Image: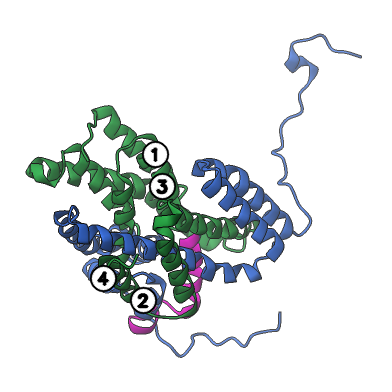
Amino acid sequence: MPPTPLIAEPSEVLNAPHSRTDLFWSFSWLALQGFGGVLAVVQRELVEKKRWLSREQFVEDWAVAQIMPGPNVVNLGMMIGDRHFGLSGALAALAGLLLFPTMVVLALAVLFATVADNELAQRALRGMGAVAAGLVAATGIKLAGALSRNPMGVPVCATVAALTFIASALMRWPLGWVLLTVGGASCLWAWRCLGAPAQPPEPPVLAPLTDADSGQTPQP
Amino acid sequence: MTIHLSAADWWALFVHFLSLSLMAVGGAITTAPDMHRYLVGTRHWLGEDQFTSSISIAQAAPGPNVLFVGLIGWNVGMNAGGGPATGWRAYSLAFLGLLVAMGGMLVPSGVLTYAATRWAHKNRELRAVRAFKTGMAPIVIGLLLTTGWVLTTAHDQPARDWPLWVLTAAITVIVWRTRLHLLWLIGMGAVLGMVGLI
C-alpha cells in the first residue's frame, strides 16, 4: 500500500443530527420520499444534503446494514441513531422510518379494500401484481451485477443463485433450509476463497488430563 | 374471506414472523415466498389476491418495503374479524395483526442489529464477516428471483394469464434498463388491468 499523505480532515465538514427529534423528522422525510428504491434517496439525503456521513462512511455502513437481517434502511437508521444518541436515538430513527409510511400504506389498503370487490379494482390489482413481480425480478437482475466482483467468481455465484432459486421457487423448501444448506455451503466456500491459509483458532489451553482424573489405575 | 383464529393461532402467526425475522438477509421481501407458503398454502389464512395486493400496495407506497409485512398481518386480522363489513371489530383485529406481524418481523432483527453493528463496524476486515457477506450475496439474488417467480406463477393458466406474464417480463426489462419512476409503472399496470388488456 503506497504511503498516503496524512491529511487530517478532508475539505468536507460533516454535520451531526441535532437531537432525537431531528433524527425522527429526518428519517420520516426520507422514508416518505422513498418510492421503491430507497438507496438513492438515503444516499442523497444523508450524504449530500445533511452530510451526516461521508461517502466512504456511507458505503461501509450500508454494507453492514445489508449484511444484517432486517430491512436495510431500518438497520442503517438504527446504526446512525445509535451512534449519536444511543438506544433512544436508534428508536427515534426507527419510529421516523415506520410511523408515517405505515399510516400511508394503511390508508391505501383501506381505500383499496372498500373497492376490492369491485371488478375494476380487481382487474387493476391483477395489473399491479404483474408489475410488482417485474420490479422484484429486475432488482435481482440489477444486483446480480455486483456479483462480478465477488471473490467466489461468477460461475460459483451463478450456481449458488440458481440452486437457491431451484430449492425455494421450484421445490418450495422453507427458507430456513435454503439458508442452512445452500447459504451455509456458500459462506464456507467464500471463507475458503477469501483465505489466506486457514488458521484454525488456537484451542483453549487446558490442563492435561492425568490418569488420576479418569479415576482409573495408572497404566505404565 | 373469513377465518377463525384461536389464541394459539395468533401465537403461531407471531412465531412465524419471529422465525423469519433473522432470515431476512437482503430485505424482508426475500422472506415473502415463505410467508406465501405458510399463510396462503399451509394455513389458508390469507387469500392469494390479498397476498399479492399487500406486496403491490406496499411497493406503490413510499417507505421501507418491509411494510408489506404489516399489511399481510393487517389482512390476516381483517379476515379473522370477518372482513371490513363487520366494522370496528374487524379493524381492531386487523390492527392487532399489523402489530403482531411487524413486531415479530422487526424485534429479533432489530435487537441483533443493534447488538452486532458496532462489533461488525469494528471488525469489517475480519475474514468471517467478509465470508458471510460474500457467501450471502448470490443467495440474496436467488431469493429475489424466487419472489418474482412466486408472484408471477400465482397466475397459472396460460390461456388466460399469458398477457400478465408478458407484462411482468416487460417491466423486468424496463426497470433493469431505465430509470423510469416506479410509480409510473405501477400506475401503468393498474390502467392496463382496468381497461381489460391483461
The chain assigned the colour blue in the figure is A
Indicate the colour of chain B: green
Q: Secondary structure at mark 4?
A: helix
**Residue found at x 34% / y 67%:** A84
- Please state which of the two labelled residues, at mark 2 or mark 1, is closer to the viewer: 1
Q: Residue furthest left?
A: B87
User: Circle 3 sits in a helix, a strand or a loop, which is it?
Assistant: helix
Which of the numbered marks, if any, corresponds to residue B41?
Answer: 1
Which amino acid is tagged 1? Gly
Please identify the dominant SS of the magenta region: helix
Whole-angstrom CA distance, mark 4 to mark 1, is: 33 Å
Which x, y percent locates residue A138? Answer: 48, 68
Instruction: For label 1, count other residues whose C-alpha is less than 10 Å away and answer few (under 14), some (14-19) or many (20+).
Output: some
Q: Is residue B108 left or right of residue A203?
A: left
Residue at mark 4: A32
Report how far apart the C-alphas of labels 3 and 1 lie in the structure. 20 Å
